[in-house]
Image: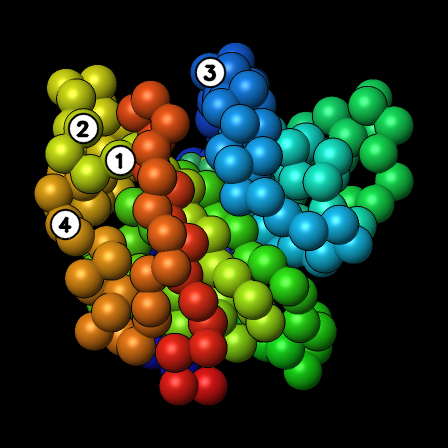
Amino acid sequence: MKKVIQTPVDFYDRIVPVYDVVARHNIRPYRRIVKNLEIAPEKSALEVGCGTGNLTVALAVVMARVLSIDFSARMLERAARKMARRGFNNVTFRQMNAFDLTPEDHGTFDYCFTAFLLHVFAPADRLLLLSRIARLATERIVVIDYAPGRYRLRYAFVEWLEKSHYKEFLQADLAGQAETAGFELVDYFEDGDYGCWEFSPAASGK
Ligand SMILES: C[S@@+](CC[C@H](N)C(=O)[O-])C[C@H]1O[C@@H](n2cnc3c(N)ncnc32)[C@H](O)[C@@H]1O
């Protein structure tokens, strides 16, 4: 299997308390974005890289069932506590690497979501991850991150800390990159600084 070079799991384990102070403010925009997607009732979702569970909260409200995965045990602990406090029982958490997801082992889902994860990877690995996810999605792959062209100086700090690819990601044309990998962009909209890309997995040649 191709070796993916990325931010190590210990980094995410270590940043949990600080990360969640900032990231919990995303629950509101995530709710608006998920509402905007007009998802029919009784749909299932896979959430890849759930972190401390802020998108998970928004998904639990509208989806019949959610599997949220992350490779950081400490991120997952925080996410599970957040869901328990809110009394949701339609979410399952699993600690695993996103690149190990397979339809054979994990089943398929109507929707696959990933928020603020793709910028972590260099373009080739980003597309590799999208292709992996696409194999588990029957209707849509939804990507949420900062909108293109919204590069701000503070993201440079995040990029430096995380050793990620924020600048390139925000200057790149994700839809264009994804198209070369066979994905069709169905819709794109923005909510403030956030962009939401909806891809169809049908065109991914699976
Ligand atoms: C920037 S955080 C975003 C968390 C969450 N989606 C949100 O919007 O708040 C990225 C998350 O992806 C997880 N992650 C990074 N690489 C991963 C991988 N290869 N497999 C699974 N999870 C990964 C990290 O542990 C972290 O929780």
Q: Can you say whether 74 is above or below 114 in the image?
A: above
Residue 134 at x, y percent in the picture: 48, 71
Question: Residue placed at 55% from the left, 20% from the top?
Answer: 28
Compared with 112, 150 (above or below) is above
Task: State how far apart marks 1 and 3 are (Cα).
Answer: 18 Å
Q: Residue furthest bottom?
A: 205
The residue identified by callout 4 is: 172
Query: Which badge, 4 or 2, is on the more N-terminal residue?
Result: 2
Q: Quadrant of residue 158?
A: top left
x and y, in percent, of residue 151 in the image: 16, 28
Q: Find the distance from the CA under tag 3 to the CA under tag 4.
A: 25 Å
The span from disc 2 to disc 3 (Cα, nearest Å) is 18 Å
Q: Which mark is residue 22?
A: 3
Which residue is labeled 2 in the image?
150
User: Which class describes the residues within 10 Å of circle 4: few (<14), some (14-19), or many (20+)?
Assistant: some
Above or below, 101 relative to 36: below
Of the 4 image quadrants, the one containing the N terminus is bottom left
Whether tag 4 and tag 2 are in contact, CB under 8 A, the answer is: no
Q: Pointer 2 and pointer 1: residues touching (CB < 8 Å)?
A: yes
Asked if marks 2 and 3 touch (Cβ < 8 Å), the reply is no
State which tag comes first along the sequence, 4 or 1.
Answer: 1
Q: Is residue 22 visible?
A: yes
Q: Position of residue 2 (x, y in %)?
A: 34, 78
> Could you say whether the residue bearing mark 2 is in a helix, strand or loop?
loop
Question: Is residue 92 left or right of 193 when viewed as pictured?
Answer: right
160 left or right of 196?
left
Q: Residue at x 88, y 28 (%)?
A: 87
Answer yes or no: disc 3 within 8 Å of ligand 1: no
Observer able to see residue 4: no
**What whole-number distance in Å separates the C-alpha atoms at marks 4 and 2?**
11 Å
Q: What's the amino acid at mark 3?
A: Val
Q: Which mark is residue 147?
A: 1
